[in-house]
Amino acid sequence: MTILDQVLTDLDAESAQLDGWVSVLDAAGWETVTTPEGWTVTHQIGHLHWTDLASVTAITDEPAFAEGLKAAAANPTGFVDEAAEEMALIPPAELLATWREGRSSLQAALRAVPDGEKIPWFGPPMSPVSMATARVMETWAHSHDVAEALGIEVPKTSRAKHVAHIGVRARGFSYLMRGEEIPEGDVRVELTGPDGDLWTWGPEDAAERVTGNGYDFALLVTRRRHYEDVDVQAVGEHASRWLTIAQAFAGLPGNDPLRLSERDLADR
């Protein structure tokens, strides 16, 4: 099994898990609000479906994707939300069916990319493995939004390592999205996964370090948890700053996540 096969297998598992949660919902369930911004379950699935379609377009029709890049550049703060709103108009049963079709189309498109070829994206161009990993990250993150809104406990699996990997690789991008210079020097990252295995990135002798719970780190870099609410520690000025701005996704960071104590007060 190739690395791409492994990542696509995990992507399929993440998608199937979310599919199982939403496929049993009635109409009211699909309208459950999942974010402070007002995204419903329908918005969440619509967003994932739209991103799958955009990924396929990036692979198979670069001129058409370039037009999408222009639209995103012209409306950086509203482009994603507008796409989600449009997708949310599709009836749930139809949206679920088309999302499933889009997932299959994406897997086929990624497997057909010639070796060594990069795929254009809203951030830096990516290899098929990187794009598949990014899709795991997106599906994982939005699954948490849906699960928390529906009161579902998300299984803690080693698939979170893909999310952590994107988060580490996107460290420099996190600074750029804040208009900050990327600091010099490496950061060693050592995290413990849900199965007890050690996930590591960066040189062992780096002066600055990030350590802790790998699953929590994945929540942090998808901006689903405030850095004060995760079991992740930093040693060094730049490592500490990184934990406050880390993001694993392309585009603007959006609103900072609320602390859990603030979320509890907001829910009362």
Image: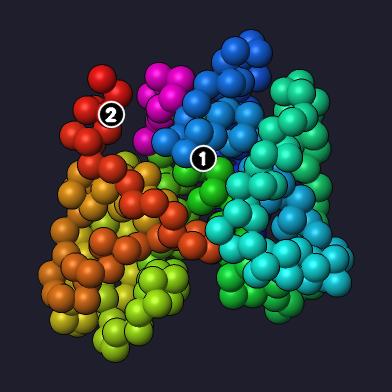
Residue at (51% x, 40% y) in the render: 142
The answer to whether residue 48 of the structure is visible from this angle is no
Q: Is residue 134 magenta?
A: no
Q: Position of residue 239 (x, y in %)?
A: 22, 71
Q: Quadrant of residue 224?
A: top left
Crowding around mark 1 (Cα neighbors within 10 Å: few <14, some 14 to 19, many 20+) is many
Q: Badge 2 is on which residue?
A: 266
Closer to the observer: label 2 or label 1? 2
Foreground of the two, 80 or 114: 80
Crowding around mark 2 (Cα neighbors within 10 Å: few <14, some 14 to 19, many 20+) is few
Quick check: 50 left or right of 17? right
Q: Secondary structure at mark 1?
A: helix
| The C terminus lies in quadrant | top left
| The N terminus lies in quadrant | bottom right
Q: Main secondary structure of the magenta part?
A: loop
Residue at (34% x, 70% y) in the render: 201
Farthest residue to the bottom: give it: 184
Q: Earlier in the sequence, mark 2 or mark 1?
A: 1
The answer to whether residue 259 of the structure is visible from this angle is yes
Q: Which residues are magenta?
A: 148-156
Residue at (86% x, 72% y) in the render: 63
Q: Position of residue 255 (x, y in %)?
A: 39, 51
Residue 112 vertical position relative to residue 102 in the rendered view, above or below: below
Quick check: 163 left or right of 191? right
Q: Is residue 154 magenta?
A: yes
Q: Badge 1 is on which residue?
A: 142
